[in-house]
Amino acid sequence: MNGRMQELGDVGRARADARSRSTVSEWMPFLPPADAPFAPADVPSTDLRWAEVVAPGGYTHLRVARGTRIRLSDPTGDASAAVLIFNALAPHERLNVADTQKIPWQAYLGADHPLLSGDGRVLATIAADTSGHHDAFCGTTSDAWNEERYGDASPEGPSPSGHALLRLAGTKHGLTARDLPSAVTFFQGVRVAADGALEWQGSAGPGTSVDLVAELPLIVLIANVPHPADPRDDYMVGPLQVVAWASRPTAPGDDVFSATPERERAYRNTIAYAELAGI
């Protein structure tokens, strides 16, 4: 009995010591999400599903239901969100940047732009955009690029690459490096010059946001890292705010649904897939 009591006492002291050392980080998720100071005021707290501030050089990953609305916000003007999305029911179906530019006949991302897979379905729609500074050309930074430019690319180092963080996020969902396509980047813009050169536009400034609506259940991977075309010598990136809430997917009757024949076909493909899957 004395030995058992001693053991319980040791556990109690260890627990008390661990709790005394616990810290609250500004980069931790808000639980409940309604506690986030950037939670939308017009969204009922019961609809909120996730809220987090992603650290500079950090990452996050979400698995969201069809119809979820995800808002990415750039509070300082230096966020740079490299984003990948996958069909959570069949992760081999993933973001296809070429089709995302081709089907809407528009290479630049903005409000109402569908993000498509290679299977002719819309994975997500940009439902709102106050930034307009995005990129679907360059992808995110590689390990080799960061090692040459900053001297390190490891996820735990001072200058993690976008690809390293997306690989790490992907492992949480059973994805490997070979599963990761080219990412799109929000809040750091690139435009094509008359001679075909890619020109970095930087951000639109602090306080902008982008809303994505999940048209299917999604796995969402996000790395908050400097854009590969950013000319600044230092590893410059600001915090990224992420908040998600229950909403609805695009439906017939919505303006974006029938904006073009190609888009309507893609949305109808998506709805048929969802209905056959019972979601």
Image: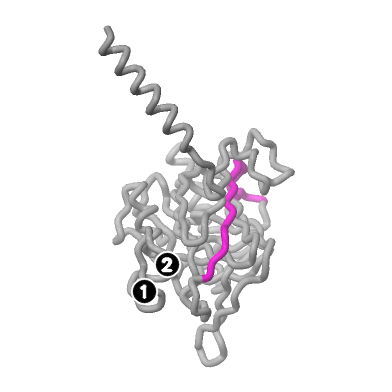
Q: Which three-letter amino acid code belongs to the residue tagged 2?
A: Ser
Residue bearing the label numbered 1: 151
* Image vertical order of residue 178 relative to residue 16, above or below: below
Determine whether the residue tagged by mark 1 lies in a helix, strand or loop.
loop
Across and down, in percent, residue 44 comes to 69, 37
**Residue ID at (36%, 47%):** 172
Q: Is residue 50 left or right of residue 59?
A: right
| Front residue of this view, candidates 34 and 233 | 233
Across and down, in percent, residue 259 comes to 63, 62
Determine whether the residue tagged by mark 2 lies in a helix, strand or loop.
loop
Q: Are marks 2 and 1 in contact (CB under 8 Å)?
A: yes
Q: Which three-letter amino acid code belongs to the residue tagged 1?
A: Gly
The quadrant where residue 46 appears = top right
Q: Which residues are magenta?
A: 236-253
| Front residue of this view, candidates 55 and 10 | 10
Is the magenta region chiefly helix, strand or loop?
loop
Residue bearing the label numbered 2: 159
Q: Earlier in the sequence, mark 2 or mark 1?
A: 1
Across and down, in percent, residue 192 comes to 54, 83
* Structural distance between the alpha carbons of marks 2 and 1: 8 Å
Q: Residues within 10 Å of mark 2 (few under 14, many from 20)?
A: many
